[in-house]
Amino acid sequence: MQNPQPRGIVAFLTRRRGGKRLDTSDIITYLYLIAGTVVMFGPVLWLVMSSFKPLEGLYEFPPTFLPYQQKTVQIAGYDQPLDLYDVKMPDGTVRRLAQISQVGIGARMIDPNAPNEKPIDVRIEQRTPVRTIHFELTNYTDSVQKFPFLVYLRNSVVVTVLATLITLLINSMAAYALSKYEFRGRDAIFVIILSTLMVPVSVILIPAFLVIAKVGWSNNLWGLIIPGAATPTGVFLLRQYMLTIPDDLLQSARIDGASEWRIYWQIILPLAGPALAVLAIFSVMWRWNDFLWPLIVVSRSDLFTLQVGLNAFQGELNQQWNYILAMTVLTLLPITIVFALLERYITTGIATTGLK
Amino acid sequence: MSDSKATMNLRGSLSLGDLLLKPFLWLLSLADVIFLPLQNLIGTRRMAYLFVLPNLLVFGIFILLPMLLNFYYGFTSGNSILLENRPVVGTANFQKLFACQNYFDVNSCSEDLFWRGVTNTGVFVVGQVTGIVLLSLVTALALNRPVRGRGFFRAVFFYPVLLSPVVVALIWKWILQYQYGLLNAFLVAIGFNKIPFLLDARWAQFWVIAISIWAQMGFFTLILLAGLQAIPKEMYEAASMDGANKWQSFRNVTLPLLMPTMTVVLILALIRGVQVFDQVFVLTNGGPGTATLYIVQYIYRTGFEFRNYGMAAAASLVLAVVLLVLTLGQLIFSRRQEAA
């Protein structure tokens, strides 16, 4: 009675730092966030769980959340392992039996502990399959072995890594010139670069295809790497960051006899580290997930990236969802790991720069 | 303070990458062998041109040049992609694109597929932008409250943004699958019949919109959250001193101060919505029929499947004009915001 703190389990659960209790709006907030978590993350979780199911488990209706496997038993006298069932007998008891055959609504069963006894005939609605949780890995091993998945993976890695390095290099060089030098045409160059922020690939599809062909890069990984490297966003981001680096640093380096390249290389680049890191993360995301550009540049399947390859698979393997699902998981895995490690930098990077 | 800590951590976690980069970096530090003599030749000041050159070359060849060539394609016809084999036809492509007996009836247009794409894109953009603005606003407001596990929830809502369009499409294709899909299992469990979600025009249109909201709202939530956090706490204190309740302080403090961010979100979502392509390409490929055929898909089909490059380029120019108007709108708006 003296103690104003409410007791009991509800009070414990609704307790909050600072001693205040949850009110209705807090509860609504939590309910919304939890529902949101189910909607946002549920589909991905469902994909991952499904990818561990054997084909017959995928084509089961209604589906189960966990992957199961039918338990079987090997009985002398039968070539194939037999499926195990729990069967409700006419007298009400439940016996674990192995199924020999099924005809219409009837099934012929045998007791695995007494294989020499006469087979038992039961109606199929009396039996329930005996199953154990089992993560089927052959979906993954088969996808990697039977399909050119590793080739696509290699192409994606090569494109992502090289493109990101080149993007960082040429964008930072341009940003250095645009932020630290006075030269004729500087503002014009900057405006032209910025104005193409709004020119998406979709608008220049046809002529870009011609240019790539003329350069000789159709069906060539360079055709995927180079064209997207001159990102206006990258130049803009790095230039804004480099503007904050004091010019005195450059002047004193010049007096010490450093060349312009060394100033860029040994002073500007290390100081622009945080901005470079943000751009690197974005570049990796852009390149790994890129679809439309590789789709038009590359038509030879040994040059497909993961995204284009995955799209091709889903067209070809219409009924083999087990492989499609496993490959989808493998494709989203690297970006998920990057996100798990660098979540804070990615989210704050987006919130402060507004780019994606 | 948290920023400097973040930077330090980032450097720490990238150290393995640094190690792998070492040979590459060493090679580039040798670049001075080329750059120093050049500097002595042209002088310190003109080195700037050398520094912008690589970026400008790539940019000029692969972005600027195609932009200009697009005009040539738009005003020529024929099935050849080579410029010299294309007869100039003036504005014929555009005339064909806009030739309609009745602008309210898509079927009366000679290029009805284009108009199908335009109307579909219109419906898509309205639905998607409304959904994105509303849902990301609600989510940002929820995440701006002092809830436990805020970082976790923020990450969960953001996660789909990182997934590639192909992955997003396949995740949902499996859930919406007619025979064995999760959603149809739910429907059957609560006593309804299965629905062929991706084979029914209306449902396909609905799901294409819903899925692209799902995939993108996390990005806009982050922007709105940053906007919310920029609102000074004193404003709320002043409002509550004046006796404002929660709803009143939301209406009179939060909403007006968040308006600039909301407009940025709105226009960005519009710009992206108009360009919708890859997710839908994998999910429905424009179908059933032409129910989910959008403008970029029309361009892709006309150009790369029908080899009608002139019409495709003309349509891209129309799309470019739409994007230009939207971007200018955003520029003018943000200028006015800065001036105010």
Image (cartoon, grey):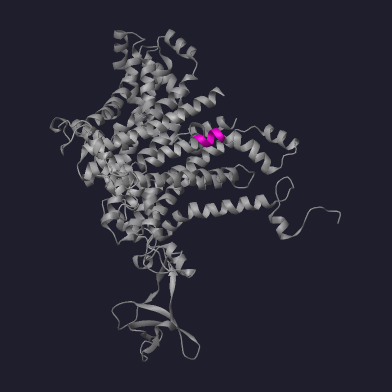
Residue A67 in sight in this render: yes
Residue A138 is covered by the magenta coloring: no
Q: Is residue B127 above or below residue B332?
A: below
- The secondary structure that dominates the magenta segment is helix
Q: Magenta residues?
A: B259-263
Question: Whole-percent x and y of residue A242?
Answer: 46, 21
Would you say residue B262 sits in the magenta stretch?
A: yes
B175 lies left or right of B6: left
Residue at horizontal 22 percent and vertical 31 percent from the top = B75
The quadrant of the picture occupied by the N terminus of chain A is: bottom right
Judge from the rendering whether residue B100 lies leftward or rightward of residue A282; answer left or right: left
Q: Position of residue B327 (x, y in %)?
A: 42, 31
Above or below residue A127? Residue B186 is above
Residue A96 in view (yes/no): no
Q: Where is residue B125 in the image (x, y as percent from the top left)?
A: 42, 44
Q: In which quarter of the image is the C terminus of chain A?
A: top left
A317 and B104: which is toward the camera? B104
**What is the residue that sits farthest to the left in this orientation?**
B85
